[in-house]
Image (cartoon, rainbow, N blue to C red):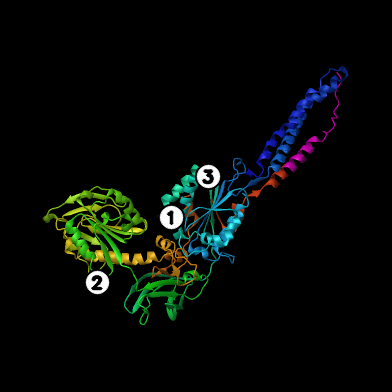
């Protein structure tokens, strides 16, 4: 409980007035003995105990009545998660809105014609009414920067459209919440009420990947002992039939384009969908069969007679949510894959360069990687590193991986028992030519060591390894006969790290013969090509945010790649930007999954339907008014004269 007029609480001192008056009245009377009244006094003393109780009880009730009147004048208020006796709670210095702007927030709200995003802004509007003097701050998931508001009405101005308007981007809520708490700490904000508005779509939280960050958020809130409070508000979309379109991969030939599409839908059964394909703005009809819950479809899109470079869009028929119905592509202007190489071992370097140079039209190699400037290094999509990573370069390699890059790591003799932030290495083992290691098992159905197109296995079992250093982190893709890892694949942030345990060097292994190394490196390069294409096409990622001075070919002229999916022209090239594939899922996170990590008593949870009762503060003067009336009635009853004392007093 807190008060809108806390200064009135000084009036509590007036509650002592009845006691003071009573004590003063006692000083005005003196007792005098009178013989004729002796027997009456004796009779009265027999009932004096009850009289004293009535007198002191009346005095106490009068004091309580005055105290309740003072509390009424102070205008007591309470919020849904606030104790009635929490007298320390005061006006928060900052009211903060953390807004989920992911594409799924554009869906219609349950039992409303407004979108989840619009409904969330209205809830924040109502949320601020209880603290009219507090400063208003907004931090949303796309740009994640604090924005101050003059008034809550500023949210609805045209200038704020880029900050709180709808987007085709994704969201990572734990990162945004963490940045908000860091900012509050750096700004020395003493008290803050933080409202988090989200539809709780699972990809926007990534609970498993962000469990440590969520636990850190929980610890921070607990340390503040109620000075900072989190209020999670779940926005629930309406239930309606919807289809969505994403792309798994694509290939391109001279006169044809082959996208592999995935159609998701929540309508059970089988249906024929009429799609629209636009090639450089010219529309062509096409049909696809859909079977619940998803269908993979690879159409052949003819490019004969089209310009050498151009764009393609594929659209589903209109449904309840049109924003996930279209996917964009460009053709003919795919950039070369940039591969950086750093090798200490001359023979290993020779083999690796040869394996990566089989397709010079698609791959651009940079040798002596760490001698280049850092701004040149981050332009690569794939790094092949053998040996030591300079101390000054370990940080940006780690960041390169975290931002979505791919790294292939080969060891050196100095790698034994070495620990990098992205990999740990085990012991260095040397065997004789007669006592070599061999690979026993590997993943044959997919990935780096998958069987060839005609079903033949790669000759991993014929490899002979004399020297090895085991990578200790990552998913094993191949094993030695003793169970140790030959090659591991580790997800680090958004990137992937492949770690070999030996070198393509005759002194180390027969990997230099190329029968295993070449197909493995080529498949990783193909993975990078697909990964790079899709990374560039996602709204809100690092690539789309950096695209400046672009011209929107589709959609509205004011569209921006970080916010709106579509085709853009940038420096004379066409760029396709799409909404993240994760935004097409229908999987929502249960509150209990978050509550296990954010279990603080200063975090509360609600949905939009019950927000008014859970998140808004209400004046509770009526409770104290009723109490005061009851005490007045009780005081009146105590003030009534007692029944006559009829019993005779015997004469002595």
Mark 3 vs 2, N-terminal side? 3
Q: Is residue 261 visible?
A: no
**The one of 2 and 131 positioned closer to us in this rendering:** 131
Residue 354 percent across, percent down from the top left: 20, 64
Q: Which residue is mark 1?
A: 207
**Label 2 near label 3: C-beta < 8 Å?**
no
Please give left or right for residue 47 compared with residue 270 in the image: right
Q: CA distance from mark 1 to mark 3?
A: 28 Å
Q: Which residue is mark 2?
A: 455
Q: CA distance from mark 3 to mark 2?
A: 64 Å
Q: Which residue is mark 3?
A: 189
Q: Residues within 10 Å of mark 1 (few under 14, many from 20)?
A: some
Task: Indicate yes or no whether the magenta region holds residue 644.
Answer: yes
Mark 1 vs 3, N-terminal side? 3
Stretch of the chain drawn in magenta: 628-652
Q: In the figure, 365 relative to 226: above or below?
A: below
**Label 3 near label 1: C-beta < 8 Å?**
no
Q: In the figure, 256 relative to 40: above or below?
A: below
* Label number found at residue 538: none
Task: Indicate yes or no whether the magenta region holds residue 343.
Answer: no
SS at badge 3:
loop
SS at badge 2:
loop
**Quarter of the figure with the N terminus:** top right
**Quarter of the figure with the C terminus:** top right
């Amino acid at each position: 409980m807190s008060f809108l007029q806390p200064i009135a609480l000084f009036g509590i001192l007036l509650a002592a007035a009845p006691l003071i008056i009573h004590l003063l009245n006692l000083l005005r009377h003196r007792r005098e003995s009178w013989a004729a009244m002796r027997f009456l006094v004796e009779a009265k003393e027999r009932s004096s105990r009850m009289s004293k109780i009535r007198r002191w009880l009346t005095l106490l009730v009068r004091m309580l009545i005055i105290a309740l009147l003072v509390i009424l004048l102070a205008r007591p208020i309470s919020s849904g998660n606030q104790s009635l006796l929490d007298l320390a709670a005061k006006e928060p210095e900052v009211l903060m809105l953390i807004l989920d702007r992911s594409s799924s927030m554009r869906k219609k709200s349950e039992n409303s014609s407004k979108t989840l995003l619009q409904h969330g802004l209205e809830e924040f509007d109502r949320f601020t009414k209880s603290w009219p003097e507090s400063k208003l701050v907004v931090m949303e998931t796309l740009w994640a920067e604090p924005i101050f508001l003059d008034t809550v009405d500023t949210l609805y101005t045209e200038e704020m459209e880029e900050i709180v308007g709808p987007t085709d981007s994704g969201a990572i809520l734990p990162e945004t919440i963490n940045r908000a708490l860091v900012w509050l700490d750096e700004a020395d904000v003493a008290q803050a009420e933080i409202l988090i508005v989200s539809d709780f779509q699972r990809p926007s939280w990534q609970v498993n990947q962000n469990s440590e960050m969520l636990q850190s958020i929980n610890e921070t809130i607990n340390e503040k002992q109620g000075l900072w409070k989190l209020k999670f508000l779940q926005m629930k979309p309406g239930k309606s039939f919807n289809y969505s379109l994403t792309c798994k991969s694509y290939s391109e030939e001279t006169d044809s384009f082959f996208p592999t599409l995935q159609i998701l839908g929540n309508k059970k059964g089988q249906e024929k969908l009429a799609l629209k394909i636009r090639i450089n703005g010219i529309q062509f009809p096409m049909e696809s069969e859909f079977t619940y819950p998803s269908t993979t479809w690879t159409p052949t899109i003819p490019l004969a007679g089209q310009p050498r470079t151009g764009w393609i869009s594929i659209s589903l028929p209109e449904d309840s949510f049109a924003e996930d119905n279209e996917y964009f592509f460009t053709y003919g202007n795919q950039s070369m894959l940039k591969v950086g190489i750093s090798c200490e071992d001359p023979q290993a370097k020779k083999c690796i360069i040869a394996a990566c140079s089989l397709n010079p039209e698609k791959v651009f190699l940079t040798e002596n990687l760490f001698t280049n400037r850092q701004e040149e290094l981050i332009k690569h999509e794939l790094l092949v590193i053998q040996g030591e990573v300079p101390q000054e370069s370990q940080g940006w390699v780690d960041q390169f991986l975290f931002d979505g890059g791919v790294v292939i790591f080969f060891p050196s003799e100095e790698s034994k028992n070495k620990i990098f932030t992205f990999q740990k290495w085990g012991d260095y083992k040397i065997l004789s030519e007669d006592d070599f290691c061999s690979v026993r098992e590997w993943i044959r159905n997919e990935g780096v060591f998958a069987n060839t197109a005609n079903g033949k296995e790669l000759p991993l079992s014929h490899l002979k390894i004399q020297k090895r250093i085991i990578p200790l982190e990552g998913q094993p893709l191949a094993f030695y006969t003793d169970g140790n890892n030959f090659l591991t694949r580790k997800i680090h942030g958004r990137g992937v790290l492949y770690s070999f345990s030996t070198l393509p060097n005759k002194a180390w292994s027969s990997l230099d013969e190329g029968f295993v190394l070449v197909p493995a490196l080529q498949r990783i390069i193909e993975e990078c090509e697909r990964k790079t294409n899709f990374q560039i096409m996602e709204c809100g990622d690092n690539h789309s945010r950096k695209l400046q001075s672009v011209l929107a070919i589709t959609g509205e002229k004011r569209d921006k790649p970080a916010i709106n999916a579509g085709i853009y022209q940038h420096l004379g090239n066409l760029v396709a930007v799409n909404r993240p594939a994760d935004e097409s899922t229908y999987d929502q996170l249960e509150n209990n999954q978050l509550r296990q990590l954010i279990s603080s008593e200063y975090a509360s949870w609600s949905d939009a339907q019950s927000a008014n009762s859970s998140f808004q503060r209400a004046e509770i003067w009526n409770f104290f008014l009723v109490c005061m009336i009851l005490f007045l009635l009780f005081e009146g009853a105590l003030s009534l004269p007692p029944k006559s004392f009829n019993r005779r007093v015997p004469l002595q």
